[in-house]
Image: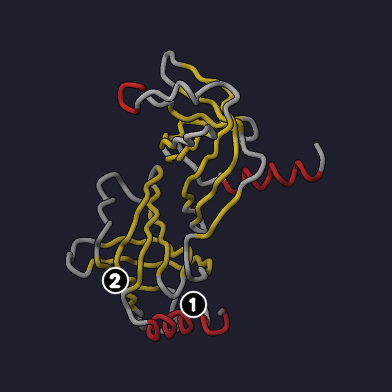
Amino acid sequence: MSEQELTLETSSRFQLRHLTVGHTFEIEFESASRPRIKLPLVGCEHGRYLIVRSPNPKTHGSYADVMYDGCPIIVRTVVEGDKGEIIAFKSNILAIINYPVRLMFLAYPENIENRNLRATQRFPTRVPITLSSQHHDQLAANGVMVDVSMSGCRLLFNVSDNQTALKEQAINLHLHYSQGNSEPILRGDVKNQRKTGQELAVGVAFTDDEAFVKQQLKRYLMIDLDLAI
């Protein structure tokens, strides 16, 4: 394997590391009509192939004219991860099986294009936090803030199956990474969440004004957004 091939393979594995079973792929068939369909990922062997659930003709309609071995396709999906980005890559259908379940094997990508979803720069952090609801006293969870920007942050929690109803909640963030005895609070709304095993990733949009957010980030996280612009 050449140095260039090794670099491409490593890059692909790195960018696909956040994909889990059930992750949705949008697949565009490179035919005259260029039909698109959303299919779930069911498995992969890194460096060799990806496996998605094949469309069921009874529910998705027939794709027989574009689904065949060797058919070129374009795959797009959203990867939250550390950056929050849309990735896209060219592939082709390696094989299709209909028994015991409908599956489609796709060639593993050699190269991946990506586009950042976030308009503001995010900074990686590992800050212990406590999340509490602005309206429900019983809702509280301890976790870690893994990245932050002027507009929001991403949090990780270890949770049980009955502790995942956070979306659309108005919350307070108590930052334990402080230089004194005070416990600063940032306020926000939970915009999205994703559970993988016992780990819950939560996206929060700050509702405090920008001046207050900048003050808190600079004072307690030593992040100066004015210098970062």
Q: Nearer the viewer, residue 24 or 34?
A: 34
Q: Residue at x 65, y 44 (%)?
A: 111
Q: Amino acid at mark 2?
A: Asn
Say what secondary structure mark 2 lies in.
strand
Residue 190 falls in image quadrant = bottom left
Answer few, some or many: residues within 10 Å of disc 1's Cα (few below 14, many 20 plus, some between 14 and 19): some
Residue 136 falls in image quadrant = bottom left
Q: Residue at x 54, y 34 (%)?
A: 30
Residue 175 at x, y percent in the picture: 39, 73
Residue denoted by label 2:
172
Left or right of 10 on screen, residue 145? left
Left or right of 170 on screen, residue 115? right
Residue 11 at x, y percent in the picture: 66, 48
- Farthest-out residue, front: 32
Image quadrant occupied by the C terminus: bottom right
Above or below: residue 94 compared with residue 30: above
Q: Which mark is residue 56?
A: none
Q: Amino acid at mark 1?
A: Leu
**Earlier along the polypeptide chain: callout 2 or callout 1?**
2
Observer able to see residue 19: yes
Residue denoted by label 1:
221
- Farthest-out residue, top: 99
**Mark pair 2, 1: CA separation:** 17 Å
Observer able to see residue 45: no
Above or below: residue 218 compared with residue 114: below
Residue 179 at x, y percent in the picture: 46, 83
